[in-house]
Image (cartoon, grey):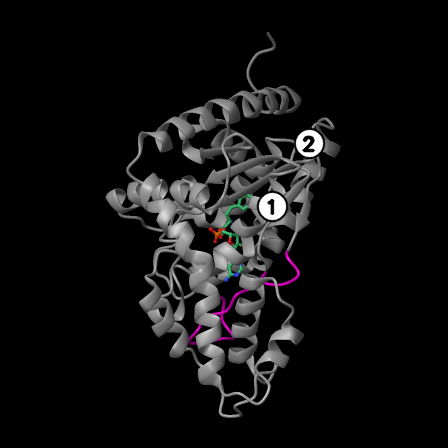
Amino acid sequence: MNTIFSGIQPSGTLTLGNYLGAIQHFVKLQEDHNCYFCVVDEHAITVPQDRLKLRENIKSLAALYLASGIDPNKSTLFIQSEVAAHTQLGWMLQSLSYMGELERMTQFKDKSEGKEAVSSALFTYPSLMAADILLYKTDIVPVGEDQKQHLELTRDLAQRFNNKFNDIFTIPEVSIPKVGARIMSLQEPTKKMSKSDENEKAFISMLDTPKKIEKKIKSAVTDSEGVVKYDKENKPGVSNLLTIYASCTGESVEAIEEKYAGKGYGDFKQGVADAVIHVLQPIQERYNELIESELLDEILDQGAEKASFTANKMLAKAKKAMGLGRVK
Ligand code: TYM
């Protein structure tokens, strides 16, 4: 059985983009793969975080994974900072990462642009991400489009390590969904929908009320043409809404275009809002039950134990291969 690893940062309430680009696929993949899903809190501290808010976001993200359908009997769900091997291997992989290749990462460029104080951890973030993946002999990493470059670097680092020291790491493949890999901002549809966007109207949070979802979709930027047609170049707003509709319902873009032929954007936007609410409402109901329950802690304890067991074995191999510590 192939092994899957993926992670999400607890840096704010998840967006519809995170759900459609990532979590939705994790739920299907767990049926026939050995899956590890991680709350990557050590990645979140590469930019400033309020400690109480971070704690809250970590638990909230774990509950959202479960409420979306991650089954702890099928998948291992855990918090990155509770498995020490991640930062340990991350450091070792940093020693193999070149400044030049880290400087080329577009996520680093985007997140550091115009900032006065940029942490060195934001710069070396991809080496830690590589460690996350390589610790579990991961075959496939399901992610949205924006993580593709980090995955290429992970593969390079694994190959570099294997060639230089010992052939211990599996070279992972990236898996990017055909539809929904890049959900765009509702206000600036040429920009990715992001949970850290300052404009709240630009993204749909997975915990937004139906009323709020409806309002945000109704005020989404479109164009003056009034034709529901997919054309990413000339109609980015409408194309984004079509992608959201298709990803939520599983219907093809063509079928949706046909359904709304001759109708205006008002009807179409109502359809998009209904589709989103239909997906998110049951998740929110389960979330509300889980967030206060003791079950959540039990699942995370078990997840950390299971993940540590596998990760520590790979860490020991990597240390031995690099010549760290003593031979016992
Ligand atoms: P993060 O927390 O930014 O996003 C989590 C997942 O959601 C996807 N995603 C999107 N998909 C479609 N449209 C969007 N607008 C959108 N925004 C986000 C992301 O591609 C991702 O799959 N570096 C990672 C976290 C990470 C990780 C890992 C992932 C750390 N270690 C190991 C995989 C394997 C990140 O910042 O994701």
* Picture quarter with the N terminus: top right
* Figure check: 327 above or below 322: above
Magenta segment: 177-193
Question: x, y (%) of residue 69?
Answer: 49, 43
Nearer-the-camera pick, 307 or 84: 307
**Helix, strand or loop status at disc 2:** loop
Find the residue positioned furthest to the bottom. Answer: 225
Q: How dense is the environment of label 2, judged by Cα within 10 Å: few (below 14), some, or many (20 and up)?
A: many
Quick check: marks 2 and 1 in contact, CB under 8 Å? Answer: no
User: Which SS type dominates the magenta stretch?
Assistant: loop
* Figure check: 290 above or below 310: below
Residue at the spot of label 2: 169
Q: Is residue 168 visible?
A: yes
Q: Is residue 199 visible?
A: no
- Hey, what amino acid is under mark 2? Phe
Question: x, y (%) of residue 214?
Answer: 37, 71
Find the residue positioned furthest to the left. Answer: 52
Q: Residue at x 40, y 59 (%)?
A: 195
Task: Let me know if residue 228 is in the magenta part.
Answer: no
Question: x, y (%) of residue 219?
Answer: 38, 79
**Helix, strand or loop status at disc 1:** helix
| Image side of residue 279 versus residue 146, left or right | left
Find the residue positioned furthest to the top. Answer: 328
- Hey, what amino acid is under mark 1? Lys
Nearer-the-camera pick, 199 or 111: 199
Mark closest to the chain's N terminus, 2 or 1? 1
* Figure check: 209 above or below 124: below
Task: Let me know if residue 186 is in the magenta part.
Answer: yes
Question: x, y (%) of residue 136?
Answer: 61, 31
Residue at the spot of label 1: 28
